[in-house]
Amino acid sequence: MVRILKIGGSILTDKSRPQSPRQEEIDRIAGEIASASADLVLVHGAGSYGHMPARKFGLPQNFDREGLLQTHQSVKLLNDLVVQALVRQGLFPLPVHPLSSALLRDGRIERMDVTIIKEMVTRGIIPVLHGDVAIDSSKGAGIVSGDQLVSYLARVLKADNVSLGTDVDGVLCGQVCLKTIDRGDLPRMEEFIGGSNGVDVTGGMRGKLMELMDLADQGTPSQIFNASREGLVKRALAGEQVGTLVRRRA
Ligand code: IPE
């Protein structure tokens, strides 16, 4: 049994201001994680720590070594805040930086060493990954989103609980939050799944759904829920459906 939880950068940071953590939210979420932390792989978004420097340096379109360095160093700061918050809850997290463990090709993870992650989980450690810059063997520079990491890890680790916490209630069709979504719903959802609030270089809700639809097609459902609502992280980790379920087309 492996659980994968991603917390979006829009929850953990103010996405419209550089390097601005929402410390209270980081602490609250760490507290909710403490209630169900066994067999957990945690992935968090980069928020303004990643999207702003990436955009400044034109990543991933431009291969810019300074941009890779500065963006990675910036997202590591947020990763450290998340790790420290988990430590304060009495948990045993360890940072895992995708830049050092994954290789991309054309923007997709070509390979990644997940043995380390598996070993950590077996030993009661919470690996804490994050959206990151990466080396792309075809284009030079790449960005690996937390969402892509979730879909890759869920497949490789055969996760049985995959939840993505965002700042919206799930997949919204106007005012209505869908209970479930599958690939067949996409055409009528086009106008609703646009971008994201703030600066986002990895595709907002559309990018998220593309990752999760691929995962669902391979047999692993997942849910998108609102992690800013108190208690929902805890309930999602307990296996409850608290947002939109992304599932395979019936
Ligand atoms: C983006 O990661 C990574 C970088 C911009 C370096 P995510 O796409 O997972 O981040 P959020 O959740 O949108 O903030």
Image (cartoon, rainbow, N blue to C red):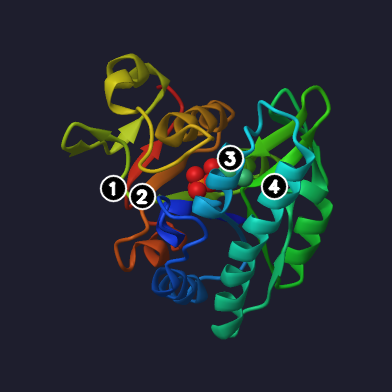
85 or 49, which lies in front? 49
Mark 1 or 4: in front is 1
- Label 2 is placed on what type of residue? Phe
Q: Tell me: 58 left or right of 204.
A: right
Ligand 1 located in image quadrant: top right
Instruction: Tell me the quarter of the picture where residue 214 sits.
Output: top right
What element does badge 4 sit on?
helix
- Label 3 is placed on what type of residue? Lys
Which numbered dot is residue 169? Answer: 1
Tell which circle, 3 or 1, labels the residue nearer the N-terminal end: 3
Are the two marked residues, 3 and 4, in contact with CB atoms closer than 8 angstroms? no
For the question of whether residue 145 can be seen, the reply is no
Tell which circle, 3 or 4, labels the residue nearer the N-terminal end: 3
Q: Which residue is mark 3?
A: 56
Q: Position of residue 143 (x, y in %)?
A: 66, 37
Q: Residue at x 54, y 26 (%)?
A: 217
Q: Position of residue 73 (x, y in %)?
A: 70, 57
Tell which circle, 1 or 4, labels the residue nearer the N-terminal end: 4
Are the two marked residues, 3 and 1, in contact with CB atoms closer than 8 angstroms? no
What element does badge 1 sit on?
loop
32 or 65, which lies in front? 65
C-alpha span from label 3 to label 4: 34 Å
Q: Tell me: 204 left or right of 177.
A: right
26 or 68, which lies in front? 68
Q: Which residue is mark 2?
A: 225
Are the two marked residues, 2 and 1, in contact with CB atoms closer than 8 angstroms? yes
Mark 1 packing: few (<14 Cα in 10 Å), some, or many (20+)?
some
- Label 1 is placed on what type of residue? Asp
Tell which circle, 4 or 2, labels the residue nearer the N-terminal end: 4
C-alpha span from label 4 to label 2: 22 Å
